[in-house]
Amino acid sequence: MTRAFNFCAGPAVLPEEVLAWARNDLLDWQGRGLSVMEMSHRSDEFMGIAHQAEQDLRQLLAIPANYRVLFMQGGASSQFATVPLNLLSEGGHADYVDTGIWSQKGIAEGRRFGDVAEVASARDNGYTAVPDPDQWVLRPGADYLHITPNETIGGLAYPAIPDLGDCPLVADLSSAILSEPLDVSRFGLIYAGAQKNIGPAGLTLVIIREDLIKPMSDCTPAMMSYAIADKNGSMYNTPPTYAWYLAGLVFQWLKQHGGLQAMATLNQRKAGKLYGAIDNSDFYNNPIRPDCRSLMNVPFTLADESLNKAFLAGAEERRLLNLNGHRSVGGMRASIYNAMPEAGVDALIDYMADFEKERA
């Protein structure tokens, strides 16, 4: 069987080696006579899997000792509510920066639970560049400031992490985590849905500084309490055990392939090739300012939008899958996460060149 190149934004491509490891253990994990899917989450076997996954993640990201790692559920979208329910103090407020659809969803959800303000927006530039941090209208004494460093839909990424002084920085890193080295100490809290660079859907990673874990309030559901999750080792109820196990395999794969610096080098090369093909053509276009372009999600349009269906059909014939843009913006989008091999990007570039010759 020849695998296709899957450019889906999520659930996204997984490393082929990881899938092979999981296949080999599917029916009989390490001679125990059962699958990981059948294990009790309280068993010594699964507790070992969970512990190893956290240790490998801590090593990959060099997570400081004063940060807790939580493996939660509900996707990143559940964190839009979980963050303010846990971090907003009574009578307090939080600031948010709008750089696209996902940050907008976070703002809207946050406003359901307290005083949340949009202190900067990329709206004025058509969401083609991150607002200059020097122009952000921050409110003194904010409980936290929330950013989305990589907007999966629009392909807009922060060129650098802003310096906020003592204000805790909260980041939705769903589509960028593990794609390059990251200074976790710059953040108060990081969260990420798994189904892009971590593993399959169903798991949500939270990395939180210990001092931000507050006692559970009366209005916070137990399943959304960081304190409850931390106290119970992310096992207040039955966690998504198989997704957790597969995430652990991805962490091992990353370590075997040189860690996050090696991923960064590869991702920069892949993205550089694809953006170069777009920029050197009058047939394709990417609107994002070059210094704010995502390494993970590359949206592009065709000069003649009537050719979109033909482009996607031709891509399918070449086994280049899921290139259609998000329904809210249209066009095309190639998500080129860690597990997308460079050969996949090369194949896409070759197809784009051939399609342009035939249709331009």
Image (tube, helix red, strand yellow):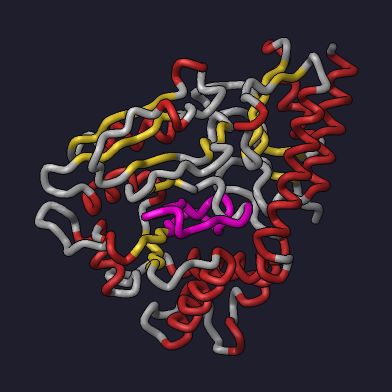
- The residue located at (80%, 30%) in the rendering is 276
Closer to the camera in the image, 267 or 193: 267
211 versus 177 height, above or below:
below
Q: Picture coordinates of residue 316 (x, y %)?
A: 75, 34
- The residue located at (56%, 36%) in the rendering is 157
Q: Picture coordinates of residue 358 (x, y %)?
A: 88, 17
Magenta stretch mostly in which secondary structure?
Answer: loop
Instruction: Indicate yes or no whether the magenta region holds residue 188.
Output: yes
Q: Is residue 229 left or right of residue 189?
A: left
Quadrant in which the N terminus is drawn: bottom right
Labels in figure, total: 0
Residue 203 visible within the image: no
Q: Is residue 294 left or right of residue 347?
A: left
Residue 130 visible within the image: yes
248 versus 340 height, above or below:
below
Rendered image quadrant of residue 18: bottom right
Q: Picture coordinates of residue 130 (x, y %)?
A: 51, 29
Q: Is residue 98 left or right of residue 273?
A: left
Quadrant in which the C terminus is drawn: top right
Q: Is residue 14 left or right of residue 89?
A: right
Closer to the camera in the image, 264 or 22: 264
Instruction: Indicate yes or no whether the magenta region holds residue 358.
Output: no
| Numbered range of the magenta stretch | 180-205
260 versus 271 height, above or below:
below
Q: Picture coordinates of residue 81 (x, y %)?
A: 27, 45
- The residue located at (75%, 31%) in the rendering is 275
Closer to the camera in the image, 167 or 67: 167
